[in-house]
Image (tube, rainbow, N blue to C red):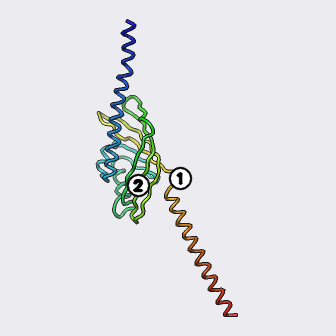
Amino acid sequence: MIVALLLFTLALPASSQEKDKAIHDQLRALRDGMLDAIKKGDIERQLTYLHPNVVVTWEDTEVSRGHDGVRKYLARTLGPGNTVAAYSVDLTVDELTILYGGDTGISFGGAVEHFKLARGSDFDNPARWSSTLVKEGDKWLIASLHASSNLFNNPLLALQRKITYAAGGVCLLVGLVLGFLFGRMRKRAA
């Protein structure tokens, strides 16, 4: 009897591990499908990976709710005539999704976002993200997604710094030239 109980106990974690492995495989498929849809710029396909009541907090602090909110945000932000001409992302996951009861999970990690702006410049932005995942029926969906960047050290600040230094240098040069010219005009007038 004790041997049977011991064998049952040893077999239990293995089946639990197999179940968790199957869940993590499903979550990897969700991640891979979403990244492929982002890479191809397929907004409608991206929405298939999102829960109908999804809440997304974007890096510009705007919040979108539901498929319509996400669709409107992406349509307004990405593509010809918008601020961002093209976007892609390389995503890393810090660890396996933390599972709660087999139908909810929290995942988090890092990313390098690739932006090509409408004005032609492009840059890579290191970022962090976290997501809540839920299982409805037999399908895992993203219920919430939060993206963030380093407020104090990011490519946009570096670009702004370069512009500020360049503008300061131009102003200094113009000031020196004007000072020299006004000085010569004053000398002639005297």
* Badge number at residue 151: 1
**Residue projecting furthest to the bottom:** 189
Residue designated by label 2:
114
Q: Residue 95 lies in what quarter of the image?
A: top left
Percent position of residue 52, x then y: 33, 43
Task: Report the residue at 37% width, 13% height from top.
Answer: 7
Task: Report the residue at 36% width, 34% height from top.
Answer: 24
Measured Cα–Cα span from mark 1 to mark 2: 17 Å
From the viewer's side, name the closer residue of 75 and 124.
124
**Residue projecting furthest to the right:** 190
Taking 140 as reference, is 162 above or below it?
A: below
Neighbourhood count class around disc 2 (C-alpha, 10 Å): few under 14, some 14–19, many 20 upward: some
Neighbourhood count class around disc 1 (C-alpha, 10 Å): few under 14, some 14–19, many 20 upward: few
- Amino acid type of the residue that numbered disc 1 sits on in the rendered structure: Leu
Which dot, 1 or 2, sits closer to the camera?
A: 2
Q: Earlier in the sequence, mark 1 or mark 2?
A: 2
Percent position of residue 179, x then y: 64, 82
Percent position of residue 25, x then y: 33, 35
From the viewer's side, name the closer residue of 81 and 53.
81
Which quadrant of the figure contains the N terminus? top left
Left or right of residue 40: residue 6: right
Percent position of residue 124, x then y: 44, 55
- Amino acid type of the residue that numbered disc 2 sits on in the rendered structure: His
Task: Report the residue at 35% width, 64% height from top.
Answer: 81
Q: Secondary structure at mark 1?
A: loop
Which quadrant of the figure contains the C terminus? bottom right
From the viewer's side, name the closer residue of 135 and 32.
32
* Badge number at residue 67: none
Q: Residue 177 lies in what quarter of the image?
A: bottom right
From the viewer's side, name the closer residue of 53 and 185.
185
